[in-house]
Amino acid sequence: MVPSTLPSVLLVEDSEDDLFFFRRLLKKAGVDVPLAVATDGQQAIDFLKRSLPGTSPAPVAPPRLMFLDLKLPLKGGFEVLQWMRAEPSLSRVVVVVLSSSAETRDVAQAFASGAQGYLVKHPAPAVIAELLRRVQALPAGASLTELDVPDTLRA
């Protein structure tokens, strides 16, 4: 297992089975990353709000990478993504949609809403490992549009 100098990750997923598979995927990829989990869209927003400037007590660091399901209780994935992109302090969070849908309209809407990638569940461990490495290697001032997400769908 590679020790974690890799980016912190937020997984927004309501399915216990998919959460299990994602954790197993990380293990098979041989990476050990700090992983936070939100099981609905509102929980994801509440988690991210704690990283906003002026949060009391002191704000926590936002995740560097977020895997976001689209079909979530309370608030859907698109709502979460749109809320995030309206928050300037969250502009450096890489968002990769992780969905069972490969519908062209979902892919197009995800990118239009500010996602950097779109993967269909369940990607290969090597894809996740490579993605984590690419996010880690992004220079501090680099635009997120420069990130090439392996195996991403395009609209």
Image: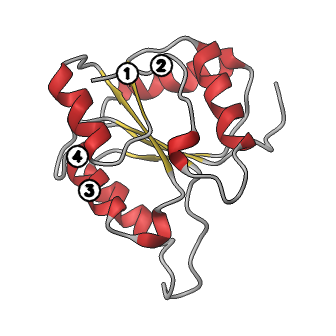
Q: CA distance from mark 1 to mark 2?
A: 6 Å
Residue at label 2?
A: 21
Q: Is the Cβ of the residue at disc 2 closer than 8 Å to that at disc 3?
A: no
Q: Nearer the viewer, mark 2 or mark 4?
A: 4
Q: Are marks 1 and 2 in contact (CB under 8 Å)?
A: yes
Can you tell which quarter of the image residue 125 is in? top right
The numbered mark, 2 or 3, whose residue comes first in the sequence reads 2
Label drawn at residue 17: 1
Residue at mark 3: 82
**Residue situated in front as seen by the camera: 59 or 143:** 143
- Residue 111 higher or lower than 18, as above or below: below
Vertical relation: 153 (above or below) 81: above
Amino acid of disc 3: Gln
Q: Amino acid at mark 2?
A: Phe
The nearer-to-camera label among 3 and 1 is 3
The N terminus, quarter of image: top right
Q: What is the CA distance from the residue labelled 4 to the residue labelled 3?
A: 6 Å
Q: Are marks 4 and 3 in contact (CB under 8 Å)?
A: yes
Q: Amino acid at mark 1?
A: Asp
